[in-house]
Amino acid sequence: GNTLGMLGGGQLGRMFTVAARTLGYRVLVLDPDPGSPAGRIADEHLHSAYGDAWALEQMAARCAVVTTEFENIPAQTLHTLAGLIPVRPGARALECTQDRGREKAMIQSLGLETAPFERVTHKEQIKAALAAVGTPAILKRAALGYDGKGQVGVASLAAAEAGFDHLGQVPCVLEQRLPLEREISVVLARGVGGETLCYPVAENIHRHGILHMSIVPARIDHATAQAACRAAIQLAEALEYCGVMAVEFFITTAGELRVNEIAPRPHNSGHYTLDACVTSQFEQQVRAICALPLGDTRLLSPVVMVNLLGDLWADGEPRWGALLEHPAAKLHLYGKSQARPGRKMGHFCVLGDDRDRIITEAETLFAALSGEVQHGS
Ligand code: ATP
Ligand code: MG
Ligand code: MG
């Protein structure tokens, strides 16, 4: 069959669906939300719970292969599907990344470094954990956190204990807050036969724990970029990964490379590939899971990507004028009907030969969306 199954119906699933169609495939999306961005444009949309046995049977019957855009698909769902059809990436890779403690332990077991961390599952463990990692620290819930949600900054034992209560006393990791020079990420693909290909390293600027801007090429030296790519490939191989994945890194003020986390799917910091690379990360996901040759990851132009969060819709539609008039800006909207603060509604890219200049242009265009800057008047 030429139908591909997608677990999750968010914007990553939507961009995958567009890429799959371009290559001649049909897409079946499973997402409980009947209005999900990917479900709305898919060839077929099952809006059942991820654990629904009937939905999984349907998926297995109709799809050649199943992939995911959401790392928190229940492990049981992945195992059930894997008994029926190929699931790429596999359950083992997803399960590893579903728990920050497990993920960091796996990273360290390969000889790669993370921020110093301790697992915390009971309040009595906090004192020793804090003594081990020191302050300032960050307490993060081990599962289900994203966009900086489910984490609290910690400067004292009292704050750590209050934070643990605030997070609902769920299993957590307490990690040292590193002094950061920069954040970067590597998106890579690994094919069915184990071949790997990295995209150029992105430099990521966060605001309030959410990605604001990615700059490509990252403003780092060649040796650091190479070390990051090598580490990302090492992680993909250890996970016996098939598909597209991303690895987030910190570069500390001392110049050390530390792995932050793994995303077992295309990544927000890889959206620039849609406009600036020969093969987008979503086309690459299609190619990898369908056992097609991987596409060229070459960068065609320096690029800056800026996220568009729901906050921009607070007073109605953003002012698109300047962005649409710019000769080298590309707007992408995800078709979400409800704009909420912090919700990812879309992004735009600005391309150009001069990296510093497109960073400034992107900030100017971003400010113009909320009317902070009067453009052309
Ligand atoms: P994502 O949406 O990327 O999955 P998340 O909720 O999993 O986000 P993290 O990536 O762990 O969160 O952290 C979000 C941001 O908070 C990081 O990109 C970084 O800016 C900051 N941060 C997290 N951990 C640390 C740390 N140990 N030291 C310094 N800064 C950190
Ligand atoms: Mg994360
Ligand atoms: Mg992150």
Image (cartoon, grey):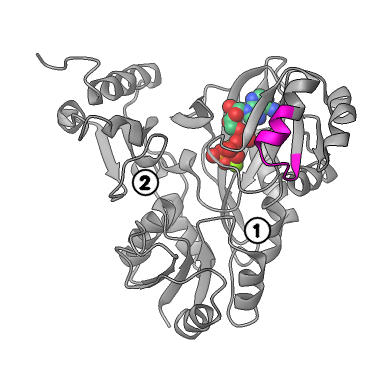
Secondary structure category for the residue under label 2:
helix
Image x and y of residue 17, in percent? 37, 62
Q: Where on the picture, by quarter, is residue 26? A: bottom left
The residue carrying mark 2 is 274
Amino acid beneath label 2: Leu
Residue 3 among magenta residues: no
Image x and y of residue 197, in percent? 57, 50
Quadrant for the C terminus in the image: top left
- Does the image show residue 250? no
User: What residue appears at the point 66 percent right and 44 percent down from the top-left corner?
Assistant: 232
From the viewer's perspective, is 155 left or right of 12? right
User: What residue appears at the point 32 percent right and 48 percent down from the top-left corner?
Assistant: 334
Quadrant for the N terminus in the image: bottom left
> In the image shown, does 286 or 324 lie closer to the viewer?
324
User: What residue appears at the point 66 percent right and 73 percent down from the top-left corner?
Assistant: 79
The residue carrying mark 1 is 94
User: Over which residues does the magenta segment extend?
Assistant: 162-172
Residue 169 among magenta residues: yes
